[in-house]
Image (spheres, helix red, strand yellow):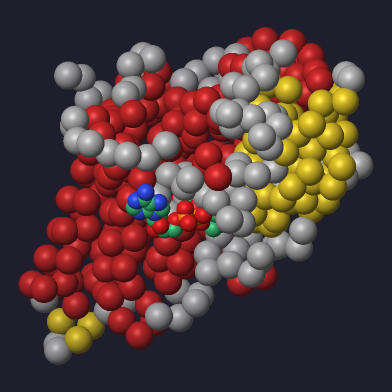
Amino acid sequence: MNFELSADQIDIQARVGEFADREIAPIAERLDREATFPYALYRQLGDLGIPALPFAEEFGGLGLGTFDMALAIEQIAKRDQTLAVTMMVSVSAGLIVQRFGSVEQKARYLPDIIAGRALGALAGTEADAGSDTAGFKTRGVRHGDDWIINGSKAYITNAGTDISSVALTLAVTTPPDAEKKEFSLFAVPRGTAGYVQGEPYRKMGWRSGDTRPLYFDDCKVPHSAMLGGEGQGRLLLHRGYQQARVFLSACSLGLADGALDLSVKYANERKAFGKTIGGHQLVQEMCAQMAVKVEAARMLTYRAAWLADKGAATVKDLAYAKYFACEAGTEVANMAVQIHGGWGFMDDCPPSRYLRDNRICTIGDGSSQIQMLLIARELGLDVVFN
Ligand SMILES: Cc1cc2nc3c(=O)[nH]c(=O)nc-3n(C[C@H](O)[C@H](O)[C@H](O)COP(=O)(O)OP(=O)(O)OC[C@H]3O[C@@H](n4cnc5c(N)ncnc54)[C@H](O)[C@@H]3O)c2cc1C
């Protein structure tokens, strides 16, 4: 095993970390409080080439891999997980287009997503079905060379900003009475007639990110908007989500690392009973536990990313990382709140924001329970689920 990062990877960590300290950390609290989408900041990420990292050079990417992207995501999430998530969802959508899209789809969507001028979205979840993807009801019906999509999606990230360009939308494309329900994936450009974006949700965390329902009201797209073949949609989206799982693990890892740093700093400053709270052994134990969880999350996340780049990541490898890192994020942020005492309970205290932000990570993108089922199935247990 070789645990050393290459010189280029160390450079990515340093450059993104330095940018995040300078440009993101000072405004993250305000973005959360005002729940405003940070257009200018996202543009800066694009100018730095961060969303470009894992894309092919022919589309304007930097030709690097999942691991390099995960390192950059970790650094951003350390200061503001919401911004990291905005980027990782867009990058994940772009990577699906790069991998499965047509020449025309790639030319149309990739350059702007890669440059940070546009955002991609993944529209899977519906109000009545999230984990149980077979329960989605949004339907596409073919009329000649077009498809008419009707239905609604819930909790879709990046679906309605001014720079949202496309929602990769999963729809049932078999008739209601078909023996087997099949899904297809459509690249639906924002602005298409019948692509109706709902009002943004009021959220516990990820407040400066864009999350809203999407409605499809006789939304007409040409057949050329389909990604992959008819009936392959669920498979393509699942594959895309697998890569997104590494990125979400990196989001929780970065957040946990940030919460640890803040806690050690605070523990060395705050005084109680005649010494710094960090001088008390029970606080020392909390910090040490946080550090172990961060390091273990890092090992599983890096390993999953490294295997993904070799094309060797199994469902179990990804589930280990997603489960452990996302749970660790919440545990570590919760301990950080504890160390910050009453101040930790205030909305504008960073650990409070970290805890609120990370809370969705064990629910979204395959909940912790779904990761457990995936692992149990790989272990050879009789797991019945789609
Ligand atoms: C802020 C935010 C952003 C999001 N962004 C996106 C996005 O960009 N695109 C998108 O498609 N979706 C998105 N989602 C949706 C998210 O992926 C879903 O909420 C998630 O998949 C869970 O689905 P659900 O909410 O329907 O919960 P359910 O599937 O109803 O699950 C509810 C609970 O039951 C548990 N559960 C379900 N099935 C089982 C089982 N078989 N065994 C044991 N436990 C089970 C789950 O783990 C969970 O604890 C987002 C959600 C939020 C809140």
Name the residue located 83 percent from the left edge and 51 percent from the top edge: 196
Residue in the foreground of this view, choosing between 115 and 372? 372
Residue in the foreground of this view, choosing between 37 and 384? 384
Provide residue 29's location: percent of width, then percent of height. 55, 67
Name the residue located 79 percent from the left edge and 31 percent from the top edge: 141
Q: With respect to residue 248, does 179 lie above or below? A: above
Question: Could you say which quadrant of the image residue 332 lies in?
Answer: bottom left
> Is residue 51 among what the camera can see?
no
Provide residue 100's location: percent of width, then percent of height. 62, 17
Quadrant that contains the N terminus: top left
In screen coordinates, is 144 left or right of 296? right
In screen coordinates, is 154 left or right of 135? right
Q: With respect to residue 259, does 86 lie above or below? A: above
Provide residue 319's location: percent of width, then percent of height. 32, 37
Name the residue located 24 percent from the left edge and 30 percent from the top edge: 378
Q: How many marks?
A: 0
Question: Could you say which quadrant of the image residue 124 lies in?
Answer: top right
> Is residue 202 among what the camera can see?
yes
Q: With respect to residue 43, does 340 lie above or below? A: below
Give the farthest residue toward the left.
281
Quadrant that contains the C terminus: top left
In screen coordinates, is 6 left or right of 286? right
Residue in the foreground of this view, choosing between 229 and 192? 229
Provide residue 68's location: percent of width, then percent of height. 44, 26
Name the residue located 28 percent from the left edge and 31 percent from the top edge: 316
Residue in the foreground of this view, choosing between 176 and 187? 176
